[in-house]
Amino acid sequence: MSDSIFYRDGDYFVPTRHAAGPWAPQWQHGSPPAALLCYGVEQYRDSDMHLARLTIDLFRAVPMEPLKLRSQLIRDGKRLKAVDVSLVDKDGTEISRASGLFYAKTPLADIPEQFAPASGDMPYPGSFEPLPFVSARAGQISAGLNAVMDLQRVEGVMGSGSGVCWIRLPVNLIDGVENTPNLRAAIASDYGNGIGQVHIDKYTGFINADINLCLHREPVEEWVCAKAKGIVEAIGVGMVETTLYDKLGAFGKVVQTTMVNQRHPKP
């Protein structure tokens, strides 16, 4: 059980220590619930359909407690399928939710070069420095998910507002369940705001309450590269845009809206 992010206990998914986030030990990192919601959406997948869009709302801090998936098939068409999934706690309180959109696959002939996505020109991991994400608690190196993830920095990151980083989850999201390509993309999707994080000063950063993941194909192999850029406005609201790559090239994009998070020291 310790070598996964969650394990099953009846209808519930129980987080292990690997699910913890950097803000406080009682709260999960955003990536595990995002990937768990993706898992719930994928249960409705047909082999001839592609998960084109996954929209996730993280409107509460996700506790390090057992959670249940609650799902509903909204549309079941031949060319389009829509699914809603929620994460609820033992009291039935909705913690976060996702909507997934599947499109039917339609083989095409040669695609004109000007319409093709970016090719695989991103340096592959192996020769880059590990990226130790720093915890919000007293500046120590983060435990939880950030400690178990393989993170290799290519450039930028650490509050500069932009960066490129290769990401790999070396354990299963759910004990006994192999990670699918879409789960690997979902795990990487919440790292955009960390990689493209904007630090106005040492007390002022930005947090996100959503993840909008669009996939024009599934990633190959385990490593996912995130190239992120953050912007902010004077009203304390911003956005991070992230392009996702694998060794073949770009396969998707993530947009996260952000809001200011000020943590002033206690007097």
Image (tube, grey):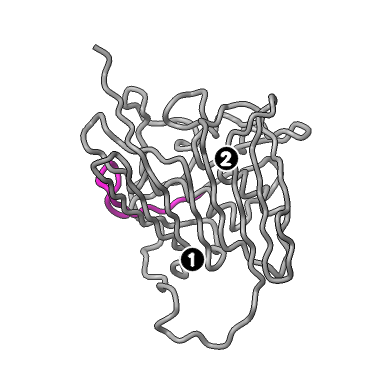
* Residue stretch rendered in magenta on the structure: 154-168
Residue at 56% x, 40% y is 32
Answer whether residue 126 is visible to the viewer in this image: no
Residue that sits furthest to the left in the current view: 201
Cα–Cα gap, marks 2 and 1: 22 Å
Magenta highlight on residue 23 = no
| Left or right of 207 in this view: 3 | right
Badge 1 marks a residue whose secondary structure is strand
Q: Who comes first in sequence, dot 2 or dot 1?
A: 2
Q: Quadrant of the C terminus?
A: top left
Name the residue located 36 percent from the left edge and 50 percent from the top edge.
Answer: 240
**Closest to the observer: 105 or 60?**
60
Residue 233 marker: none
Determine whether, in the image, residue 233 is placed left or right of residue 71: left
Magenta stretch prevailing secondary structure: strand
Q: Which residue is mark 1?
A: 251
